[in-house]
Image (cartoon, rainbow, N blue to C red):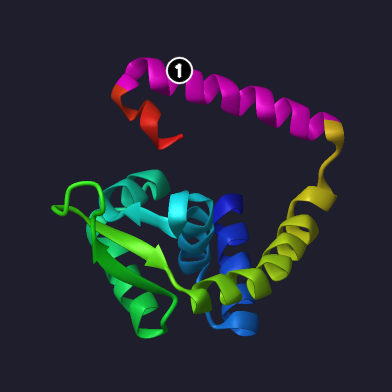
């Protein structure tokens, strides 16, 4: 429940201050980290642990706001890639401080270094166990 409340608060802050959702922000972040600001839709959905249809709907909304465009894959022309636009980059740069401030205020500032060290060890173990159980999902990292 704490994770859901945190995500809801971060979403609310991004919507109020920048008119984008937390999911849209996450897509912009992932595209900004990808080569040439582009990523195959299927890989984007897998990386976000969202259904492909959910990501498709979100990307469609983002296209209408000129944050991204969809193009045929440069690699093979068969797949579809989401590509960040200059407007998308501008919105990401403007929204990043709001997101960072929210994460600090609602999470980071509430925990000690020891808390984060313990949390890191726990999630490392969770990741290791889940990846051992399903090694084909290692590419979502």
> Magenta part of the protein: which range?
114-135
As for residue 17 lying within the magenta part, the answer is no
Query: Where does label 1 land, which residue?
Result: 129
Q: Is residue 20 left or right of residue 78?
A: right
Principal secondary structure, stretch drawn in magenta:
helix
Q: Is residue 62 left or right of residue 119?
A: left
Kindly identify the residue that appears in the image at 41 percent across and 82 percent down.
66
Image quadrant of residue 56? bottom left
Q: Nearer the viewer, residue 111 or 23?
A: 23
Q: Position of residue 17 (x, y in %)?
A: 65, 82
Q: Position of residue 25 (x, y in %)?
A: 53, 66
Q: Is residue 22 left or right of residue 133?
A: right
Kindly identify the residue that appears in the image at 62 percent across and 59 percent down.
6
Q: Position of residue 5 (x, y in %)?
A: 59, 60
What secondary structure is found at the residue carrying circle 1? helix
* Classed neighbour count for the residue bearing mark 1: other residues with Cα under 10 Å, few (<14), some (14–19), many (≥20): few
Image quadrant of residue 37? bottom left
Up the image or down, 122 lies above or below 109; here it is above
- Residue 134 appears in view: no
Kindly identify the residue that appears in the image at 51 percent across and 79 percent down.
87
- Residue 92 appears in view: yes
Q: Position of residue 118 (x, y in %)?
A: 73, 26
Kindly identify the residue that appears in the image at 83 percent across and 29 percent down.
114
As for residue 131 lying within the magenta part, the answer is yes
């Amino acid at each position: 429940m704490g994770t859901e409340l945190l995500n809801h608060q971060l979403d609310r802050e991004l919507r109020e201050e920048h008119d984008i959702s937390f999911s849209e922000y996450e897509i912009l972040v992932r595209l900004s980290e990808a080569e040439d600001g582009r990523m195959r839709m299927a890989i984007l959905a897998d990386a976000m642990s969202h259904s492909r249809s959910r990501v498709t709907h979100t990307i469609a909304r983002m296209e209408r706001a000129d944050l991204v465009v969809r193009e045929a894959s440069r690699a093979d022309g068969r797949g579809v890639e989401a590509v960040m636009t200059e407007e998308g980059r501008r919105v990401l740069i403007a929204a990043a401080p709001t997101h960072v401030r929210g994460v600090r205020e609602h999470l980071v500032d509430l925990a000690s270094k020891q808390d984060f060290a313990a949390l890191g060890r726990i999630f490392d173990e969770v990741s290791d166990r889940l990846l051992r159980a399903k090694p084909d999902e290692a590419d979502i990292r």
